Amino acid sequence: PPVWQPFIDILQTHAKRVSISHGYMFYLGPVFRLAGGLGTYLFIPVIFGSVVFSNFSMAGDLLLVMYFIFFGQLGMALGAGEGGHPYSPIGIARGLAQMSTFEVPFALSVMALAIQYNTLNITTIVAAQQGSILNWTLFTNPLAVIAAMISLLGMNMHSPFSIVLAPQEIPIGPPIEMNSSFLATLQTNRGLFGSAKLVLFMNLYFGGAAHANIFVALAIMVVKTFLIYMFSVFVGAAFPRFRPEQSMRFFLKWPTLIGILSIILVAYF
């Protein structure tokens, strides 16, 4: 399909209307989801040193971004629960359980960064990584990066952590239950939220996008976020999907242990 086809599909679905009603919360779910994705993006600086692309970055914005990541997923869980479909509680239970477990190593990684850089401001963290590629968190605190990148696999829900949509297992979900403009809102957020997470990880662990020329900085951002995303794609192509209990046990074991070690190394060594 042509590159503009997704935009045509979004406009087409936004133009449709539906007469089926499942309750207010069912339709507020996609709205909360979009608010979470948009809020995540708006408080992440995209280009370091650019006033236009700094968005609403402020002191402590890293904590605010973490709250927004939760907000969208919790809102969607409330919306799915209102639908009344028998598979909805299964998806909600799996989604919230996996979200709670993969947030543990990610939170530990963020704590390690806060101790290392003595700040919770994303712009300040990016600034501390300038000057040389060896100043990136990837090289100064590799354990925190490993814990965070494993958490990213759960956030992106690629295999082996695609237990919520569960292809070939649960033949139902928001793309089927939602329709018209609600489906368009969900699909818009899927692209926006995914992009916001990639930019966040680029800023925290891979030096951000910094260059005197704004177009070169944008090109750097595209390359870095593409490589971060392809990490999830490669892992998803190499490993089969976990069962729900295997996924939870995994996140609470190895990446959590690595996150704890990253804090200990930064705090005491």
Image (cartoon, helix red, strand yellow):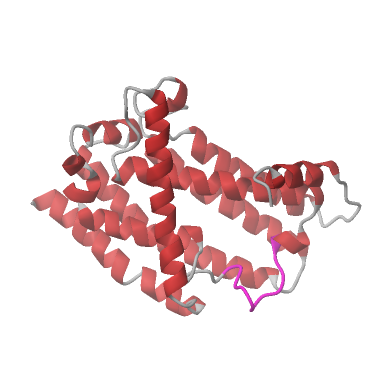
x, y (%) of residue 157? 51, 63
Question: Is 153 drawn above or below residue 33 in the view shown?
Answer: below
Is residue 100 visible to us here? no
Is residue 27 or residue 5 the one in the foreground? 5
State the residue lying farthest toward the front.
2
Q: Main secondary structure of the magenta part?
A: loop
Q: Residue at x 73, y 45 (%)?
A: 10
Question: Is 68 drawn above or below residue 149 in the view shown?
Answer: above
x, y (%) of residue 58? 39, 27
State the residue lying farthest toward the right.
19
x, y (%) of residue 68? 51, 44
State the residue lying farthest toward the top.
51
Find residue 253 and report its image quarter: bottom left
Q: Residue at x 28, y 39 (%)?
A: 207
Question: Is 24 drawn above or below residue 50 in the view shown?
Answer: below
Is residue 185 or residue 5 the one in the foreground? 5
x, y (%) of residue 172? 72, 70
Find residue 116 and report its image quarter: top left
Residue segment shown in magenta = 164-174
